[in-house]
Amino acid sequence: MNDSTHGMSRRRMLGTIAGAAGAVAAGAAGLAPSPAFAGNGVLVPSGKRGIILYSVRDRISAAPDETGVPYGFERVLARLANIGYKEVEFAGYTQHTSILGRQITPQEIRKVLDDNGLRANGSHASVPSTVNPTTIAQFEQTLDTAEILGMTHIGTGSDPTGSNYKADWDAAADRWNTFGEMAAARGLKLYTHNHDAAYNFLLDSGPLDGQGRPTRSSGVRKLEYFFGLTNPEWVWFEMDIYWAHVAQHRYRSYTDPDGVTQTNVFDPLATVAVRTKRFPLFHAKDGTYNPASTNGYEMVPLGQGDIDYGGFFANMGAKGYHNPMWEQDTAPGGAADPGRSLRFAEISYQHMSSLRG
């Protein structure tokens, strides 16, 4: 049996398990369960298939060259539309200045989107770390750009805070509610994109350290705490499904207030299913399971790894509501293989479009 066959076999096995678990999670959330193999419906409608441009950042930022591989916004977005993508999430608004002799403008990017039938559906922009007149004005400019590009969501690629402590998450929630209300007033959903650290356990109890900070946990995870603090009409979420599985691998226990180690394995699917409409966006990033590595997974094109996207999308509820964006941090191939990121984009699109459940 070759590696490819083995990988598919394992995904089918994981899909059966995830499908059963997801149906339970959806039922517990009061959502109509959607068993992974109950039908043959398209799990990601054609208009919802997206990509974050970070995956092809090497070609967005490339200077004109003789490789024959598209470069810059106009050529790369045209290629992505030709592959079949309908939505793009931005990770910056700049390209190589030699293409136009200057930097491209948001208005020019919008024309490229419109010309190719693409929709901007988010951006990893900057959410200020403080609230004051200057940062409010800066965020208004961020919202201005989002409106020019026709976005429905605006977000950031980092956690609301990198802290493990309750007080810092309280402060972050106040700040995000403020900026989320500003975005909502413009018809935009402000979202936070999270990696594995956000699903670690909040330090909120037990003996204090030398700086007066708690050293133990009640068992609540940091982002779960944040869910409850933020207004669901103002603050939204984009789960990176790969990093959520890394969290499942890494954050499996905590020390309770009495100093006893408690086991609690993170369940990405259940976390979404109980609040599925607060996750309008996802990063659909795949990985092969490697328990010997720190993260437990290694990134690969969508469909070539061990994360069961069919089971996940079939059982998270609100079928057809969500917008998955393909991402692979390691897609660029450098000078040795300049076409790799766009090649991986096509492979990943084909898998996304094939998902049924």
Image: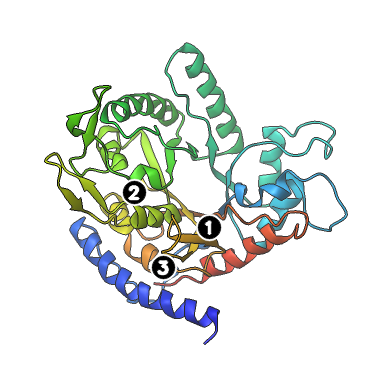
Q: Mark 3 or 2, which is nearer the eye? A: 3
- Image location of residue 106, percent across then percent down: 67, 33
Give the amino acid at mark 2: Lys
In the picture, residue 241 is in which quadrant?
bottom left
Q: Secondary structure at mark 3?
A: loop
- Among the two numbered marks 1 and 3 on one chain, the one whose residue lies closer to the N terminus: 1
Q: Quadrant of the C terminus?
A: bottom left
Residue located 25% across and 51% down the image? 253
Residue beneath label 3, please?
A: 308
Q: Amino acid at mark 3?
A: Asp
The first of marks 3 and 2 along the sequence is 2
Which quadrant of the figure has residue 2?
bottom right
Q: Nearer the viewer, mark 1 or mark 2?
A: 2
Q: Which mark is residue 277?
A: 2
Marks 1/3: CA–CA distance = 22 Å
Q: Nearer the viewer, residue 268 or 298?
A: 298
Label 1 or label 3, whichever lies nearer to me, is 3
Q: Are marks 3 and 2 in contact (CB under 8 Å)?
A: no
Give the residue at x 44% y 29%.
183
Q: Residues within 10 Å of mark 1 (few under 14, many from 20)?
A: some
Q: Which residue is mark 1?
A: 47
Task: Identify whether 234 is placed above or below 116.
Answer: above
In the orientation shown, which residue stands out farthest toward the top? 133
From this view, report whether residue 26 is shown above or below residue 125: below
What is the spatial separation of the Cα atoms under label 1 and label 2, in whole angstroms?
Answer: 18 Å
